[in-house]
Image (cartoon, grey):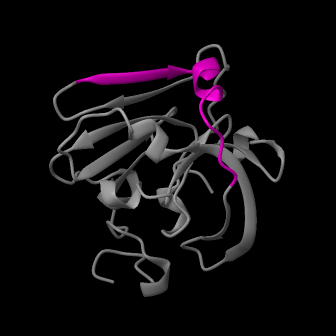
């Protein structure tokens, strides 16, 4: 499922950008990103449409690695994607080995229709929080709703609490 058409991002134009609440920018090109330490999480994923896929295998870079040198007082992140999609998350849900920017699934490059060249992976939340075609992340002092959250989806999206819609 996608909120719009699949963007095609050439690798020589791809970048990942973290912008702090003070405006400080941290930027990685595709070659720089691929030089970062690789992790290979094997995790279960859960969709808001009531399906799960167990034991999925990914390769990518931990958000812990990307945020290690970032000085911030932020409590929230707004992740944005090529194509305009956004999703909001508490920063604490992106740290301590809970989230990655992944570029391989099951040993192969991530296909564009599944978020390639890179997507966010936050397996302990519903999969709409794992933004496809990830481009960057703004660190925020206060929460700001993303694409689905602005139209009624739950701000957090815990699959074990079945937090699908506002009020769940």
Give the left or right position of residue 80, taking residue 48 as reference.
left
In this view, the residue in front, 107 or 35, is: 35
Residue furthest top in the image: 12
Residue 33 visible in rendering: yes
The front one of 92 and 141 is 92
From this view, report whether residue 46 is shown above or below residue 134. Answer: below
Residue 27 sits inside the magenta stretch = yes
Above or below residue 125? Residue 99 is: above
Q: Is residue 117 left or right of residue 159?
A: right
Residue 65 x, y percent position in the rendering? 48, 40
| Residue occupying the point 37% across, 24% down | 26
Count of numbered tags: 0
Q: Position of residue 49 (x, y in %)?
A: 59, 74
Quadrant of residue 152 within the rendered picture:
bottom left
How far across and down, in percent of the image, does residue 72 sit? 22, 39
**Image quadrant where one finds the C terminus:** bottom left
Residue 28 against residue 21 in the figure, above or below = above
Magenta region includes residue 36: yes
Q: Is residue 80 left or right of residue 22?
A: right
Q: Which residues are magenta?
A: 24-40
Return the residue nearer the eye: 145 or 19.
19
Quadrant placement of the N terminus: bottom right
Which residue is pictured at 32% across the width and 66% down the height?
Answer: 155
Relative to 99, is 17 above or below?
A: above
The residue lying at 45 percent from left, 84 percent from top is 162
Q: Residue at x 43, y 58 (%)?
A: 96
Residue 90 in sight from this viewpoint: no
């Amino acid at each position: 499922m996608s909120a719009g058409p699949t963007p095609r991002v050439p690798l020589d134009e791809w970048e990942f950008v973290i912008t702090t609440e003070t405006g400080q920018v941290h930027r990685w090109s595709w070659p720089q990103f691929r030089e970062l330490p690789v992790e290979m999480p094997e995790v279960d994923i859960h969709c808001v449409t009531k399906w799960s896929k167990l034991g999925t295998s990914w390769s990518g870079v931990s958000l812990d690695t990307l945020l290690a040198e970032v000085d911030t007082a932020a409590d929230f992140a707004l992740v944005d994607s090529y194509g305009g999609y956004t999703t909001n998350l508490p920063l604490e849900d992106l740290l301590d080995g809970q989230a990655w920017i992944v570029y391989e699934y099951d040993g192969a490059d991530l296909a564009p229709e599944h978020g390639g060249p890179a997507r966010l992976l936050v397996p302990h939340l519903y999969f709409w929080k794992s933004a496809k075609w990830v481009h960057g992340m703004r660190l925020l002092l206060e929460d700001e709703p993303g694409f689905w959250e602005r139209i009624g989806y739950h701000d957090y999206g815990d699959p074990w609490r079945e937090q699908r819609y506002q009020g769940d």
